Image: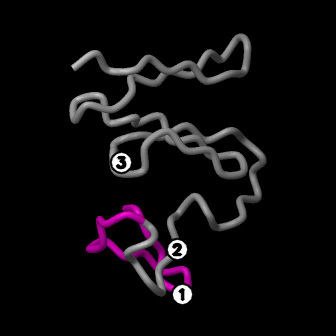
Amino acid sequence: MRYLNADLSLNLRAKDQPKKTEGLLPWFSVPQQCGWLQLFGHWASLGLRTEGQAICLDGGYAWGGQLVAYDVLRNRVAAVINAK
C-alpha cells in the first residue's frame, strides 16, 4: 500500500512516485491522529523524505542512492552516500 484514493480508500495498484500519480494521495500525506513518528521504507523512488511525522528511510542504496538510518536516541536521521 502506497496510495489512497481521493475518498481515502486504499489504492493497491499505483507504485510510481507521487508526482506521477494524479488524483492519489501518498498514505503519509494524509493527516494522522496518533501523533507518533512513523518510519517507513521499501519505497526507493522517494529517497530520504520527511513529511510531517513520517520519514522515508529508503534512500535507494541498492540502486546507487544513500544508506539511511534513524537514531532514536538522538531523534535524527543519518545518511551515507553510496560509493558506487
On-image quarter of the N terminus? bottom left
Q: Are marks 2 and 1 in contact (CB under 8 Å)?
A: yes
What secondary structure is marked by label 1? Answer: loop
Rendered residue at 41%/40% (across/down)? 41
Rendered residue at 50%/39% (across/down)? 48
What secondary structure is marked by label 2? Answer: strand
Task: Return the x and y of residue 19 as percentages of the image width and height.
Answer: 45, 71
Q: The residue under label 3 is which amino acid type?
A: Trp
Task: Return the x and y of residue 2 as percentages of the image width and height.
Answer: 40, 62
Q: Taking 33 as reference, is 7 above or below it?
A: below
Which mark, by number, is residue 25?
2
Q: Nearer the viewer, residue 23 or 30?
A: 23
Q: The residue under label 2 is which amino acid type?
A: Leu
First in residue order: circle 2 vs circle 3: 2
Residue denoted by label 3: 43
Task: Please name which of the two marks, 1 or 3, marks the residue nearer to the observer.
Answer: 3
Q: The residue under label 1 is which amino acid type?
A: Ala
Q: Image quadrant of residue 58?
A: top left
Please state the extent of the stretch shown in magenta in the rendering. 1-17
Q: Nearer the viewer, residue 81 or 44?
A: 81
Q: How far apart in space, not on screen, are marks 2 and 1 (Cα)? A: 7 Å
